[in-house]
Amino acid sequence: MRIPHAIKGLKGELKVPGDKSISHRSIMFGSIAKGDTLIRGFLKSADCISTMECFRAMGIEIEEGSDKNGEYILVRGQGINGLKRPAAPLYCGNSGTTVRLISGILSGQGFDSCLTGDTSLSRRPMKRVIEPLSQLGASIRSEKGDGLLPLLIEKGALHGGEIRTKVASAQVKSAILLSGLYADKETRVIEPSLSRNHTELLLSAFGADITGGSDEDPVCSVRPGKELHGLDIEVPGDISSAAYFMGAALLVQDSEVCLRNVGINPTRDGILRVFKEMGAHISIENERTVSGEKTGDIITCFTSDLKGCEIRGSIIPTLIDELPLIAVVAAAASGDTVIRDAAELKVKESNRISLTVNNLKAMGADAEELEDGMVIHGGKTLHHALIETKKDHRIAMSFSVAALKSSDVQPVEIRDSACVGISYPDFYKDLDGLANG
Ligand code: S3P
């Protein structure tokens, strides 16, 4: 994909696709609930389709349809013990959320299973779920003993207990909590800082006996024995997808973009806080709660005097997926932006620290890698380059935004640009709509 610099401001409004984290969870929890779960606003991207296919392979009927209110997904839940032994290894594609959350569910089943994934997922660390789930009584190991996929899970007896996680990861926390549905006692998770709490909110809406997951009550605990019941879910727009258009509007002169019905859960809204600290003109309208999640319309205008800032500590889990984009915006801001406590970026779909820094440098920015983050010395003029994505969707989208700010007429080339299909299949079409509509 070749993306030219913007010739005019981005204008108009957009409904970004459904939240990826909530879409995964809707399928998973709907499958182990009793009765039907109707999902609207579901994100039909490669990652969420991986989750759908895994549950279909365990005997769950998942229908896709549409009616006068638009498209929907109907999950015919079979109850907490209604999954069937899959005939083959469950393939999770590129999706860390699929493999890690399912590992928690599979630990509590009365059958053996195996989890696999694509090349990128096969490089990502699984010890983070193997260790805590094993401590809780699960029989789970990596086939080659290297902490990587394939994961082999055998029938185990989960006995609950308390886990202090080493990293603030919603995927790890969720795997533990989901295993707790199948334990014979309470399961508790204490995180170093609070990660996204969609599992806690949605499991509770399905009827699970679960508490915690907020700043006031950060220790999560789940008690077994409650049946989950199917429900209707409206998935809000994904703030991680909305972020690219916020970034684009901030950087391109004369822009004003309204992003409708975006999830602004406080465990995900770090991007709003950071952009505001950088001096961004952003406002939120029509705040409401949809399916237990706070949402609003986000209006972003071009801001000529963006300045760098320091991002570290407990805000990091609330904007972890937005850091490559923040780095792009920081490159165009004045002064330095320092990102620390973000070593997790190295074990995402790619090493997002080195890939972001290298691509920024290729475009003429001044950036340095740190062990746990990066420093961007802002204010340099950006120019066209060939962007290496390593098939990481968030790198492709972040640098598509950078392309709009490039100062020369030659377009920026995004290698393996189709990877945006992991989380946002229509990304280029929507970007073009706002930039040239
Ligand atoms: C996710 C949690 C985050 C995030 C990922 C989705 C989730 O990962 O990066 O894109 O849905 O729970 P970690 O929890 O491992 O940081």
Image (spheres, grey):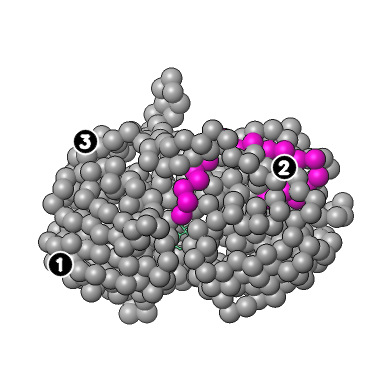
Q: Pick the residue in front: 186 or 413.
A: 186
Residue 301 disc label: 2
Is residue 368 visible in the rendered structure shown here? yes
Q: Position of residue 173 (x, y in %)?
A: 34, 62
> How many angstroms separate mark 3 from mark 2 (CA)?
45 Å
Residue 12 disc label: none
Residue closest to the far top: 68
Residue 77 colored in magenta in the image: no
Q: Are marks 2 and 1 in contact (CB under 8 Å)?
A: no
Q: Is residue 356 left or right of residue 100?
A: right
Q: Is residue 399 left or right of residue 173?
A: right
Residue 159 disc label: 1
Residue closest to the far right: 408
Answer above or below: position of 156 versus 303.
Answer: below
Q: Are marks 3 and 2 in contact (CB under 8 Å)?
A: no
Question: Which element carries disc 2, helix, strand or loop?
Answer: strand
Residue 258 colored in magenta in the image: yes
> How many angstroms separate mark 1 from mark 3 (CA)?
27 Å
Amino acid, disc 2: Cys
Q: Position of residue 103 (x, y in %)?
A: 30, 62
Q: Residues within 10 Å of mark 2 (few under 14, many from 20)?
A: many
Amino acid, disc 1: His
x 35%, y 74%: residue = 127
x 25%, y 59%: residue = 221
The residue labelled by disc 3 is: 35
